[in-house]
Amino acid sequence: MDQRRDHRFRSDFVTVFKVGGREGSGLLAEISYSGARLEETNLRPREGARVTLRVLVPPVAAFSLEGLVARSTPGGFAIHSDVFDSEVRRLVDDVSAIVEARR
């Protein structure tokens, strides 16, 4: 059974991230109101590490999302966002609308 509480939206936006003073990059594969999953990352932070994502979403301005690494994947990692507010919800809605418009 899937324990995730929020619907996930697929995407493919270039994302840079910071973890413990190091910078990495990857593709934002999925995003939801409570987290995100990155693939094709050049760094794999440990579970529990605090990560700040900077998602580059053309034509919308880039946005940031912060959270803790919840799990590793074969090509990257997933974070759980510990900040849940209307701004995050708006950003996720914007990303999903852009993805849908590109289909």
Image: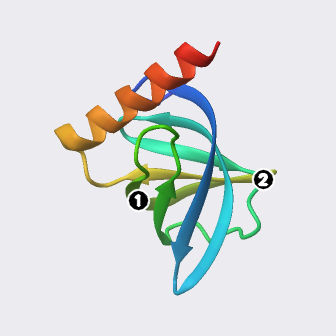
Visible residue check, residue 60? yes
Q: Secondary structure at mark 1?
A: strand
In the image, farthest residue toward the bottom: 21
| Residue found at x 58% / y 63% | 16
Give 40 or 100, whichever is nearer the viewer. 100
Quarter of the rendering occupied by the N terminus? top right
Residue 41 is left or right of residue 24, and the answer is right
Residue topped by disc 2: 40
Residue at the left extreme, as displayed = 86
The answer to which quarter of the image holds residue 29 is top right
Mark closest to the chain's N terminus, 1 or 2: 2
x then y, percent, for residue 82: 31, 55
- Identified at 67% across, 63% down, the residue is 25
Mark linked to residue 78: none
Specify whether 39 is left or right of 87: right
Q: Quadrant of the C terminus?
A: top right
- Name the amino acid, label 1: Gly
Give residue 93's position: percent from left, percent from top.
Answer: 36, 26
Looking at the rendered structure, the secondary structure element under dot 2 is loop
Residue 65 found in image quarter:
bottom left
Q: Amino acid at mark 2?
A: Glu
Can you say whether 98 is above or below 16 in the image? Answer: above
